[in-house]
Image (tube, helix red, strand yellow):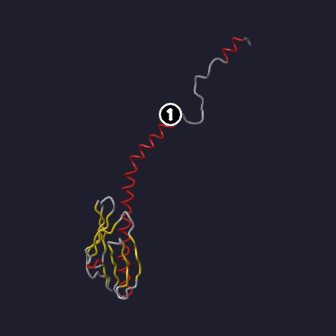
Amino acid sequence: MSKSEKKLHFAGPPTVRCNLAGFSLLELVVVIALLGIITGVGLPYYQSFTVSLQLQGAARDLTSDLRYAQQQAVTTQNNYQVVFDINQNLYTVENASSGLLIKSRVIKSPISLESTTLASSTAVFNATGAAVSSGNVILSNSNGRHATIDIKPSGYAQISFSY
């Protein structure tokens, strides 16, 4: 081989890009910027959604505890009550006859026990499972949404949400 043939054979870098592993810095910066934008837009919606789920969970827990008190009243043939303390943001399930505390539950932030229309802030269930007085309990969250638990004279507790 002559020197000129060698030059032609080894002349210049390859014109086609080889399969190199990795990404360029520009590609990496673009992907990180897009992830930042998507996160910035989506995070407030996610946080709002989480707070709404917490309100739904707290309302269902309260309704479940009301039904538990009703069930205990029927089973033991004694009055059971659920006492709401709005200032402490908690409620208790008690045997109304003996005063025995069955359960106490603190409603955690960002959910708050807003108000109740029950007499003495107490839901009392008699031996037949009926509510001694009807009324409602309202829970709210930091987004201004509400869950209302209506206690019917029959003792049935029903949840409704306002968004």
Query: How many numbered circles does the render carry?
Result: 1
Name the residue beneath numbered marker 1.
Answer: 26
Tell me which residue sits at (30%, 61%) in the image: 145
- The image shows residue 81, relative to residue 106, as above or below, that is below
Tell me which residue sits at (66%, 14%) in the image: 8
Image quadrant holding the C terminus, namely bottom left
- The image shows residue 163, relative to residue 2, as above or below, that is below
Q: Quadrant of residue 54?
A: bottom left
Tell me which residue sits at (38%, 69%) in the image: 107
| Amino acid on which disc 1 is placed | Leu
Image quadrant holding the N terminus, namely top right
Q: Quadrant of residue 86?
A: bottom left
Residue 139: x and y, percent? 32, 67
Along the line of sight, which residue is nearer the eye, 142 or 30? 142
- The image shows residue 159, relative to residue 50, as above or below, that is below
Residue 99: x and y, percent? 37, 86
Q: From the viewer's perspective, is 130 left or right of 36? A: left
Along the line of sight, which residue is nearer the eye, 161 or 51? 51
